[in-house]
Amino acid sequence: MKYSSLAFVVLAAACTTSPPPSQVEFTPGTAWVMEGAGWAEEAEAVYTEATEYILAEAAQRPAKSWAVVLDLDETVMNNVQYQVERETIGESYTSESWYDWTQRKEATLVPGVEAFLNAVNEAGGFVAFVTNRSDSEQLATEENLAALGLTRHDDFRILLTRARPDGANKKDARYDIVPGMLAAQGYENVEVIAYLGDNVGDKPETPGEWTFFCIDQGAMYGEACAAVPGPGL
Ligand SMILES: [Mg+2]
């Protein structure tokens, strides 16, 4: 009896203890983003390209007449740590575990985004974030962003989450009201000239006079916009 109890304890411990991350076989996208090198270079290259684009546009436009709209997760905020933790215990995304992750406020910045946002603000543009994070996660999201040096007013003017559990996934209705929200704040006739995201839904469904810039996140989440997710362009 004594020995069988001991065996049970050992067995139970073996079942509940996660392997160290070094022994986990991560999905290719997670491994790529976690390792960082090629992923960071690609993200920085996209933000450099986007910066060149907005500076050229800004040279032809009055200040405060244009804006850029960015997705948050895997575009501004890097959540690979969440994915690493899920895969380490053999689990994938759940809304509950995601909520817990957002409340920790531990996302980091996607390389290149801070310089891009500074360039937009210095060149006279507005920054709006449109995210599918839940409204229940908005406060922690803003606090996470602030801890990363991105604050409302100084760095962005709008942050639109979505309602859950039955709020709309698609962002078009929220894209539509960005100029109206800026007008209500005193900035009329603002045109959105660029969308930046990691998913195909991070831009309006209907083409318009804007340019889309795709951040490659290795196809960790959603429907990736990258033609070849992960290493390679
Ligand atoms: Mg995203």
Image (cartoon, rainbow, N blue to C red):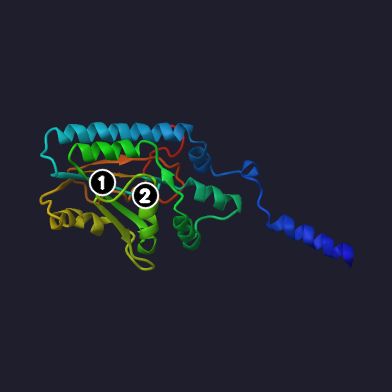
Residue at 46%, 32% in the rendered image: 38
Residue at the spot of label 1: 154
Residue position marked by numbered label 2 in the rendering: 145
Foreground of the two, 101 or 231: 101
Q: Distance between the residues labelled 1 and 2?
A: 12 Å
Q: Can residue 233 be seen in this view?
A: no
Quarter of the image that includes the N terminus: bottom right
Number of numbered tags placed on the structure image = 2
Q: In this view, does 224 lie above or below 165?
A: above
At horizontal 41% and vertical 51% (from top left) the residue drawn is 222
Question: In this picture, is 139 found above or below 43?
Answer: below
The picture places residue 61, in percent across and down from the top left corner, at 11, 38
Instruction: Please provide percent x and percent y for residue 56.
Output: 18, 31
Please state the horizontal and vertical placement of residue 178, each as a whole percent of the image: 20, 54
Q: Which amino acid does label 2 sit on?
A: Leu
Please state, as top left, top right, bottom left or bottom right, where the C terminus lies in the image.
top left
Locate residue 229 relative to residue 8 in the image: left or right. left
Mark 1 residue's CB less than 8 Å from ligand 1? no
| Position of residue 51 measured from the top left corner of the image (x, y, whole percent) | 26, 34
Residue for point 31% across, 36% down: 115
Tell which circle, 1 or 2, labels the residue nearer the N-terminal end: 2
Residue type at tag 1: Asp
Does dot 1 land on a helix, a strand or a loop?
loop
Q: Pointer 1 and pointer 2: residues touching (CB < 8 Å)?
A: no
